[in-house]
Amino acid sequence: MGGIVARVHQWQGKEMATAWDVGGGHQLPTRAEQQSVLLALLEASEIGDGAVLDLGVGSGLVAEVVLEALPRAELIGIDFSPPMLELARERLRRFGTRVLLRAGDLSEPNAIDLPLRRYRAAFSVQTIHHLSDHEKAAAFAWVAGIVEPGGLVVIIDRVRVEEPLFKDWLLVWRRIDPTTAGTFADHLEDLAQAGDHPALLEDQLAWMKVAGLNACCLHLYGNRALLVGRKAR
């Protein structure tokens, strides 16, 4: 419960939302490369005038580049933070009716007021780790039920590092972020303070497959993974 409270408190504040928007997540060394892969996958997926679902649209930073890359597509963005949605509305205003934003919490996906569309793709960038494992599996099942046959699902998120491998992860991660330090206990405390609940890579792939998606990890550095799923035709 403490992690959930931290998550809600963290992202419901306007100051936090604004600070994140300014930083843009650029402090994460893997973000640019994995976002580039996401765009390449979307561009190759023949979205056309179909819809793309952004799970955790935040302030619209990723949604903006997706809309620019897919000039005919519509984007439906979901987020549970009103300040983030306010920032996203302002950032994406220039795209007019191609954008539809909805308030909704992925921990209760069936309660989200999602418009009927031909969802040819769905993606999530650094959002799923806020959910419990049970909620992650339920969210994957929900998304798999929404996208059209052959539809693309991309999850960019952190994965869990277990204590026996923490020092090995630290050695690898310092190759791209030399300032990284701390013990496994520090790592767990950071996760708790942020309300983060990363799951094992193999568990996330298993949940995607149970949901009816052909799934694979196609990019991984340290504990940051890009998972790709395709719904069977």
Image (cartoon, rainbow, N blue to C red):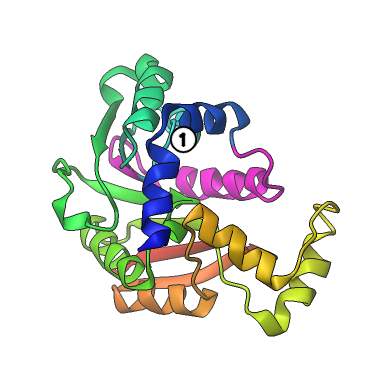
Which quadrant of the figure has residue 186? bottom right
Residue indicated by mark 1: 66
Specify the farthest residue to the top. 94
Determine crowd level at label 1: few under 14, some 14-19, many 20+ residues with C-alpha closer than 10 A: many
Location of the N terminus (image quadrant):
bottom left
In the image: residue 200, left or right of residue 74 = right
Of residues 157 and 184, the one drawn nearer to the viewer in this rendering: 184
Q: Position of residue 218 (x, y in %)?
A: 58, 65
Percent across and percent down for residue 151 are 33, 57
- Residue type (three-letter) at the residue carrying disc 1: Val
Does 151 lie within the magenta span?
no
Which quadrant would residue 107 be assigned to in this image? Answer: bottom left
Q: Is residue 211 left or right of residue 219?
A: left
Side (left or right) of 155 relative to 176: left
At x 27% / y 49%, what residue is drawn?
105
Vertical arrangement, residue 175 with respect to residue 61, above or below: below
Q: Residue at x 34, y 33 (%)?
A: 73
Q: Is residue 24 left or right of residue 204?
A: right
Residue range corresponding to the magenta coloring: 25-54
Residue 133: quadrant of the picture: bottom left
Residue at point 30%, 49% (across, down): 120
